[in-house]
């Protein structure tokens, strides 16, 4: 398929056989870091699905949930790490996060969940869903919500995998900013949360800093977080392949 509006940044041809990654969660997945020139450099093997469900070369901001606030997230650096490790890979990012949302708002059947599934199904016409990246929890940091988070998250991921016919797709989740005191209990529970989901792992937010609001990671920290997500995903993928081999 040819895109007429190549001058607008659209890919001249629809990329095929991509490794697809679904990006979901709230604002720290969407990204609120300051966009710098390095974040606007495209890679010929990294694409993103726009709000209009068109493929374009990926650059920050990837997300469109809150256009006046959207900025650098972890997804771009994650993708750069993936293609660097596999020179034959083409990555397609599916930005679907929404700032300020709770896990309950991501329940199967809800608006956010339904839209993420629809976008991923559209993307899967041109590739294979290879991973799910989740970063969320600021809206679920109260003691009562933390107690049930693992069960609720596991149920959501199980249904998401089923709906996308990708039961064995790896899932990576990340700690909330350690600079936020209200996140301490949530972060302490995250290892157990990840253990409740098959083929799931988590990454640390150790030594990462906020953008000055005690809530959102700054751009340098989000690039580091993207690297950690990529390393965790590649390890999980290797472990999953070894399990199948056995």
Image (cartoon, rainbow, N blue to C red):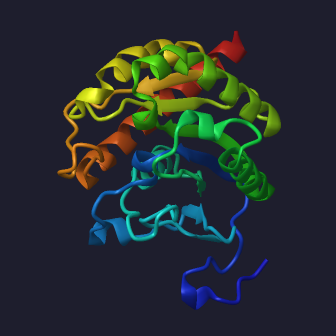
Residue drawn 30% across the image and 57% down it = 33
Spot occupied by residue 226 in the image (x, y as percentages of width and height) = 39, 44
Would residue 20 be found to the left or right of residue 2 on screen? left
Spot occupied by residue 207 in the image (x, y as percentages of width and height) = 19, 33
Residue drawn 71% across the image and 16% down it = 244
* Residue 233 is at least partly visible in this image: yes
Residue 188 lies in quadrant: top left
Q: In this view, does 116 lie above or below 171?
A: below
Nearer-the-camera pick, 100 or 239: 100
Q: Is residue 216 above or below residue 177?
A: below
Nearer-the-camera pick, 130 or 111: 111
Residue 171 lies in quadrant: top right
Q: In which quarter of the image is the C terminus?
A: top right
* Residue 131 is at least partly visible in this image: no
Residue drawn 71% across the image and 83% down it = 3
Residue drawn 42% across the image and 65% down it = 60
């Amino acid at each position: 398929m040819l895109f007429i509006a190549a001058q607008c940044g659209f890919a001249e041809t629809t990329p095929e056989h991509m490794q697809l990654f679904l990006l979901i969660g709230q604002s720290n997945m969407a990204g609120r870091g300051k966009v710098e020139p390095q974040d606007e450099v495209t890679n010929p093997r990294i694409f993103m699905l726009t709000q209009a469900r068109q493929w374009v070369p990926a650059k920050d901001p990837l997300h469109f949930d809150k256009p006046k606030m959207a900025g650098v997230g972890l997804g771009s650096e994650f993708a750069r790490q993936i293609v660097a490790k596999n020179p034959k890979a083409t990555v397609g990012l599916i930005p679907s996060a929404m700032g300020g949302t709770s896990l309950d708002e991501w329940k199967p059947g809800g608006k956010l969940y339904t839209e993420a599934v629809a976008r991923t199904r559209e993307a899967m016409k041109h590739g294979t869903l290879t991973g799910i990246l989740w970063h969320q929890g600021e809206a679920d940091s109260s003691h009562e919500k933390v107690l049930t988070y693992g069960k609720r998250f596991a149920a959501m991921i199980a249904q998401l995998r089923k709906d996308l016919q990708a039961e064995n797709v790896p899932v990576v989740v990340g700690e909330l900013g350690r600079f936020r005191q209200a996140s301490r209990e949530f972060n302490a529970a995250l290892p157990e949360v990840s253990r409740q989901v098959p083929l799931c792992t988590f990454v640390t937010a150790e030594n990462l800093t906020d953008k000055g609001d005690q809530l959102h990671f700054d751009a340098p920290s989000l690039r580091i977080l993207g690297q950690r997500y990529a390393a965790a995903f590649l390890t999980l993928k290797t472990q999953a392949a070894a399990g199948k081999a056995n």
